[in-house]
Image: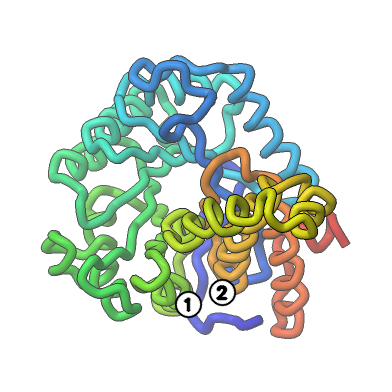
Amino acid sequence: MFKFEKEQTVLDFNGTKIGGQPGEYPRVLGASIFYNKHETVLDDHTGKIDKARAEALWNRCQELSDITGIPHFIQIIAEYGEAFESYFSWFDSIDNTTAFLMDSSAPAALAHACKYVTEVGLADRAIYNSINGSITPENMQALKESDVNAAIVLAFNPGDPSVRGREQVLAEGGVAGQEKSMMGIAEECGITRPILDTAATPLGLGSGGSFREILACKAIHGLPTGGAYHNMTVSWTWLKRWRKSVLADQYKGKDLLLEQMAHHHFGGFEGIRQAAWSSPDIGCNIMAATLGADLIMYGPIENCEGASTAIAFSDIVLAEAARELGLQPQTENHPLFKLV
């Protein structure tokens, strides 16, 4: 579609490469596991899990990566340090290569995670998620003292969701509760493999800036860029309300033709609900990929099927367009060579 004038950095995570010009490398998918109320979690404090079920989910992601050429990272979520230890140990026991994101809303748990992965020799695979305006001095210190050198760096400005506002937070500093910019903090903490996150914000509250910032990050900084764009669907209040009430319950038992259509084409009203939800959920990720996003954190790991095929489609289109700009896929394991 286009080629950035800025030289593009490509990062290597044990053979998984991320970054570059659109069309050179496949997008990398990020699958969330052990999130709140995830069925694989038996005890979210100790990190006790249904290992067979969790492994089956990850194996499916790997199978899809093998089929499509779209690589995966796994995003491990925990609210307690003990749980992080359990999750990291489990993941390393079934996959000793793939990078993993360490994600938590609890600063103490993330600080503990940094220390733990350093102690057990997993820091080279760990990606801290994320350096943002709420990062505490304790977490900055934990990162500095750890061997973790990769992090998601968030361009979120609560006071200004425009591209200008996001760039202020990312590269200039003095906003979002921090004196330094997010990139400045990352450098201070020893982060040599930053992945810029354009901070998906809800529809009506700067969602356009979330997408335009992809172009800005790649054009200005030349660094791998992405985000969790599915959060736009999750936060779309109208869709949640419409999906629950209008789309199904209002018509159930009242409109025979619609009810017959629902069962014939969607397997019932629940199928219509799911279609209404999954379409924008997949669409927002295709939009991001088309604009050059390198990392697509698509949310629950169970959504791996739709995410993999949608992004494979996008990558094929990008690679074909890139050829007209003098660019070529830089890996033989590209969807263009596997699926066409």
The amino acid type found where label 2 is placed reads Leu
Q: Is residue 287 left or right of residue 42?
A: right
Question: Which residue sits at x=53%, y=39%?
Answer: 74
Residue 93 x %, y %: 56, 19
Q: Position of residue 301 (x, y in %)?
A: 58, 39
Q: Residue under label 2, please give it.
A: 291
Q: Nearer the viewer, residue 98 or 257?
A: 257
Mark 2 or mark 1: name the one nearer the start of the chain.
1
Q: Image quadrant of residue 116? A: top left
Tag 2 secondary structure: loop
| Viewer-nearest residue: 302 or 222 | 302
- Residue 333 horizontal side relative to residue 231, left or right: right
Applied colour scheme: rainbow
Tell me what residue is drawn at x 40 percent, y 17 percent: 43
Q: Quadrant of the C terminus?
A: bottom right
* Vertical relation: 308 (above or below) 53: below
Q: Quadrant of residue 315?
A: bottom right
Dots 2 and 1: beta carbons under 8 Å? yes
Check disc 2: other Cα within 10 Å, few if <14, some if 14-19, many if 20+. many
Residue beneath disc 1: 215
